[in-house]
Structures are given as structure tokens and as C-alpha cells.
Amino acid sequence: MPRSRHYFPKPGEWLQRGASEAGFDPTKLDEALHYAAQSEIEWPKDLRPVLGRIDSPPYNKVLGPTKERGPATGLVIKDGYRVESWGDIDRADMTFSATKSYLSVLVGLAIDTGLIRSTQDLVVDYVREGSFDSEHNRQIRWQHLLQQTSEWQGELFGIPDTVDHNRSVQGSTMSSKKGEKRKLNTPGSYWEYNDVRVNMLSYAALHVFKEPLPQILTQVIMEPIGASKDWQWHAYDNAKVDIDGELIPSVPGGAHWGGGLWISTLDHARFGYLMLRRGNWKGRQLISEKWIDQSMIPCEHNPQYGYMWWLNTGNRMFTDASEKSFAAMGAGGNIVFADPVYDLVIVTRWASDGAGIINRIIGSLNR
């Protein structure tokens, strides 16, 4: 195995550098961290009232486990070394849609190992239990699911795709009322942030791997990068799927209805650092560079989005960052940000202004 010129943290430790040594203006960085600590989101500690609140009955319900959130928290990694942190970086918390980027990496593993031949393949050729059998759904390719342009139609675990029709989020120009059924477009021709369809991608990936996705993530990604044993990926209570006679939980790509990835800030940072190092950890290629490059290609119908990673195309999301930066992002200010130009990973949790925090930290670099 070739030796890497980069520093990689061992399990259970992460070497630290001072702000000046890491290339920051200490005064400006202190100001940025003070802003971060004061920018806690105004959400209750008990997150159950938050879940499903954007949905109309009967879909405004909690289907999976939840836990109380922690305080505003974050971590700054420069050139691989810890520089500063705030809050409780060891605490495993719900992370909402930042989960989607982990799901993207798992689909990449399926591509790398040949379980899926190409993202241009039709999903119906891999998932034959009926979910993609309709004339409309038969047109859906893996790329469509990854880019959120699938327009998949149906119901999964009791929730219909229409619940997220016309949903307005970062990068979207939609303005109609969320949950208002609209005419479907040809798969691949229209971008919509739709958690039911994301969960369908996870469901489809489960049919390909035929093993629990958290188990695959543990073996291929989290253990090799030295993550803790504290993270969990929870399914909904009604999401067990028959795979060759065995009931296996199908995990969601977020926490819209509960469940999802529960993970610490430190473990998030390891994952972000793996992506910053283009899938390589201590000389071992865990996910191919080809997949990472493919994941960062802007979607034709939303250039701020790749394969379930948010992109800084045109510097529209993070004005002080490079255009090559990217992020896993979830509700509640849960962000795993990476900038290969500045060799920087920043994680924020429970932030009311995650982008503002990240911009301030980058602005404190001596450039």
C-alpha cells in the first residue's frame, strides 16, 4: 500500500495545530467561533415537534426513532489537523439530510464493485419487485435518483411521492404549495427535492447489496477511517423489506419522518476528510476518484446539486469558499463542508446560519 503524504488521524485521536500554525488569523478565527457559538438554531431540544411539521395530515407523523439534539457544535480541520471546535463534538446527533451524501457514497461503492454497471442503467433492471414497473417509472435511471430528477411516482412505507411535490429548498425555484400534486415530468428533466424518492434510492440500493446499508457503510467506510462506534443509521418502524426471504430494514436518506443517521461531529469530519482526500485514506482507495468526480458534476436542472452533494457552483452557497467546495447538508444547520482549494473541512451542527459560520471561518484564513 503506497504511503500518503497527508496526515490521517488514528482511531480515537486527532492531532491539533494552533490557529497561526494552521494559517489562520487568530483574532478573526476567534470572532468567527464566537459567532458560531452564538448562532444556535431556535429549535426545541426535543425534535419530534419539528419532524413532519411541513407536511399535511395524515403524513405529518413520526415513523422512526428520534433523540434530543445537542448544543450548537462545530469543528474546523485544516490540512488534516484539528484547529478549533465548539460545543460537544463527541455527541452523536440526528443529522437530517446530511445522510443523503453517505447514501451517495454507498451507491458509488455499488458502481465501483460492479453491482451496478452504470448510473445510466435503468433501475427497473435491478429492482424487479414492482416499484419501477409502471410505464413512467420504467424510464428512471440511477442518475435520476442520485440527482433528484427521478420523478418517481408511488408510495413507500405509507408515504406518497406527492407529499414533497413543489417543495422549496436551497437551489430550487419552485413556489407552489408543498404537497400540492402536480403533473409529473419525464424522468431526468425536472429537479425536485423529494425525500420519498431519496428513500426509494436507499430501498433500491438495498435490493442491489442485499445487506443492510449501515453494515456496508461500517465495513467499507467507517471502520477504515477510524470512526467511533457511536454512530447509528435508523430505519422507520415499518420499513423492513423482504430480501431473498430475509427481512432487512431499509434506512432513509434523512430524518424527515424520524430515523436517519445519528453521528458525532468528529465522525462527520472524518467522512468529510475522506471526501477531501478524494476517497483515499492512508493510501487505501475506499471509494474511487472517478465516483467522487462524477458526484460533483452539477445537475443540468439545478447546478447547485450533484449526486446528493450540494455544490458551490458560482459561489452561490458559500461566497468566501472556492467554487470547488461541496457539502453534505441537512436541516438544523447540519453541514459537512469540504474545500479542496483551502484543504479545509468544517462541520456545523444546530446552526441558524451555517453558511455564515463557514464564510467567516474561511475569511479568517491568511490568504
Image (cartoon, rainbow, N blue to C red):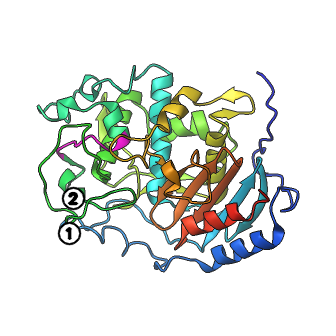
What element does badge 2 sit on?
A: helix
Q: Who is closer to the viewer here, 152 or 302?
A: 302
Please tell me which residue is depicted at 59% across the width and 29% down the height of the picture. 289
The quadrant holding residue 219 is top right
Q: Which residue is mark 1?
A: 56
- Residue 329 in magenta stretch: no
- The kind of residue tagged 2 is Val
- Residue 149 in magenta stretch: yes
Q: Which residues are magenta?
A: 147-154
Tell me which secondary structure the magenta stretch mostly adopts. Answer: loop
- From the viewer's perspective, tell me whether residue 317 is left or right of residue 164: right
| Res. 89 in view | no
Do the CB atoms of the residues marked 2 and 1 lie less than 8 Å apart? yes
The CA span between labels 2 and 1 is 8 Å
Q: Quadrant of the C terminus?
A: bottom right
How far across and how far down the image is residue 68, in percent?
A: 50, 72
| Res. 48 in view | yes
